[in-house]
Amino acid sequence: MKKTCVPVAIATALGVVLFLPMWVRAQTVSDTPYTAKCAGCHGSDGTGSSMGKTMGAHDFTSAEVQQMSDSQLSDIITSGKGKMPAYGKSLKADDIKALVAYIRTLKK
């Protein structure tokens, strides 16, 4: 019985070791809609990139942004505002919801 368990344990361990890096890679910030759509102007930390600041991009860590409702943030992401483009056609509703949740994590 022990001889059969060893190959199974090794195969399971090998599967975890090989699968884990792919799972971790899928969870990195560089793969998120925030990095793809927002960080160019709002910066990786939400305070604004140098280009974004010259264009008037809002600081996501500010009280002004953090006091907006989830609905207001979703509407801005979906429809755009000022120089910010609309992302309603290029992002799924779940992605927009996740962006709002991520913006909430950036408060000071």
Image: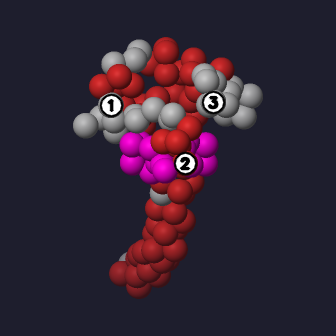
Of the numbered discs 1 and 2, the one sitting upstream in the chain is: 2
Which residue position is annotated with label 1?
A: 62
Q: Quadrant of residue 88?
A: top right
Asked if residue 4 can be seen in this view, the reply is no
Which residue position is annotated with label 2?
A: 51
Residue 11 place in picture, x, y as percent: 49, 76
Q: Which mark is residue 83?
A: 3
Q: Which mark is residue 7?
A: none
Q: Quadrant of residue 85?
A: top right
| Nearer mark to the viewer, of 1 and 2 | 2
Determine if the magenta segment contains residue 65: no
Q: Secondary structure at mark 1?
A: loop
- In the rendered image, the residue lying farthest to the front is 54
Which range of residues does the magenta coloring cover?
Answer: 36-50
Q: In the image, is 46 to the left or to the right of 51? A: left
Q: Secondary structure at mark 3?
A: loop
CA gap, disc 1 and disc 2: 18 Å
**Relative to 9, does residue 54 appear above or below in the rendering?**
above
Of the numbered discs 2 and 3, the one sitting upstream in the chain is: 2
Q: Amino acid at mark 1?
A: Ser
Residue 17 place in picture, x, y as percent: 45, 74
Badge 1 local density, few (<14 within 10 Å), some, or many (20+)? some
